[in-house]
Image (cartoon, helix red, strand yellow):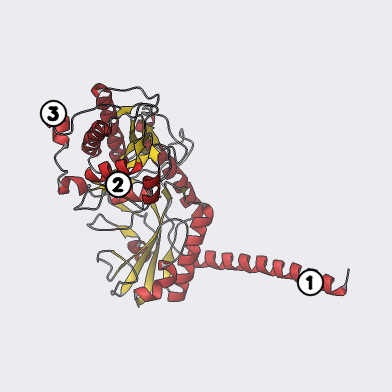
Amino acid sequence: MSALQLGLIVAGVVLVIGVILYNQWQERRARRILAGGATRAATPAPASRGRTEPTLGGADDHDALASRAPPATANAARGVTELPATPFTVPMDDVSTLPADDRDAMEPLDDETASEAPDDEAVALPDDEDEDVVRAATFPRAPGAQPDPDVECIAALSLPQPVTASMLSPGLHARIGKTVRWFGRTAGSGAWHIVTDASTERFGELAACLLLADRNGAASEAQVQSFLRVVGELGAGLGARVAAPDAKVEVQRAEALDRLCADLDVQIGLTLMKAEPGTVAGTRLRGVAEAAGFHLSPGGRFEFVQEDTGTVLYTLQNVRNEPFTAESLRMTSVPGVVFLLDVPRVADAARVFDQMKLAAKRMAHTLGAELVDDNRRPLDDPALAKIRAQVQTAADDLAGVHIEPGSPRALALFGA
């Protein structure tokens, strides 16, 4: 071995050791920065449970839900429950023959009904000796976007002098792997405002919020640590006092929250199939779907959107689990499609199901197809009524743990 090779090896070893020591120093420095703040612990579960569960404003709601059997089997993503499809055909222009519930479903959702969601429960962080810092971490119920301590890891910053949004750029643009939101207020008793690059206010108090769980799973310890490090370093640069939670506690809360959401994550699918060996030409499908009010989205599915609010009420997807594109629809045909209702993401899910069911019946008639279960057996209106009841139960279960379907909290927890 030459002297040059030996020297390169020694230099490499020294470099690796230096990087490790530097990282340890940075971590100790961040912990010192964050150590002076108040710590918000998760609400402990009863001893018999053996693990920490989120309360989301209710005490033992999750235990009550756990006693119920799930309505159907779960798929692999996050335990999302998909209910089987059902069939029925009805002439497109003979609405008078529909059951009363179906005729009612033809009426558009009232804007107020579709978008209305009760305010979340008021939640505050525990008291601490440093009252000024704790006050910055107290989030009463108020209109508009607010920090959500039940589903977010929150670090509060009390500033020696007001700052502008431009001074928060490292935090606003941090990429953690989970949604990060920043809020600020101009006075101790003032309302919290979401902070963006376009914000013009000068903020004396800040709250940095990391979403603890979504459909990709719970926030990991590395993500929580990275978030707290970003906040701590930014706070140190601004001379702020930082009230930060314990990372391990937040990871436990994230895992418990993810388990709760997995139990409540229900999507309702109605499968429309042509009798074998029949298929539907992609161009024909697109024409019928667009005539029914669907729009092809970049995500590879057709979406039925409420025009006034922009809310996706339900979608139409390829039964082959392949995305639709303008090109694929011109070139291929499909044996069927799936109407899908994402229960946590829509308000008044039972009524939206009625609308989706009617759209599925109409399309089945137009395409000469029928709605079927997982074994491709036609089902009747009583079966549809049972599925509707399950939709309502799923929505009630969500509301029972203070996750109102269609609310900002639900959209965050049940988003990608």
Q: Is residue 267 visible?
A: no
Give the mark toward the camera: 1 or 2.
Answer: 2
Residue 396 percent location from the top left of the image: 27, 35
* Residue under pointer 1: 8
Give the mark toward the camera: 2 or 3.
Answer: 2
Q: With respect to residue 203, does 411 lie above or below?
A: above
Mark 2 to mark 3: distance in Å? Answer: 26 Å
Contact between labelled residues 2 and 1, with CB atoms less than 8 Å apart = no
Three-letter code for the amino acid on which mark 1 is drawn: Leu
For the N terminus, give its image quadrant.
Answer: bottom right
Q: Is residue 386 left or right of residue 41?
A: left
Out of 147 and 392, give the one closest to the viewer. 392
Residue 148 percent location from the top left of the image: 33, 54
Contact between labelled residues 1 and 3, with CB atoms less than 8 Å apart = no
Secondary structure, mark 3, is helix
Image disc number at residue 56: none
Residue 389 percent location from the top left of the image: 26, 29
* Residue under pointer 2: 303
Q: With respect to residue 1, does 97 lie above or below?
A: above
Three-letter code for the amino acid on which mark 2 is drawn: Glu
Q: Earlier in the sequence, mark 2 or mark 3?
A: 3
Mark 1 to mark 2: distance in Å? Answer: 59 Å
Q: Earlier in the sequence, mark 1 or mark 2?
A: 1
* Residue under pointer 3: 100
Label 3 crowd bin: few (<14), some (14–19), many (20+), radius 10 Å: few
Three-letter code for the amino acid on which mark 3 is drawn: Ala
Label 1 crowd bin: few (<14), some (14–19), many (20+), radius 10 Å: few
Residue situated furthest bottom in the rendering: 161
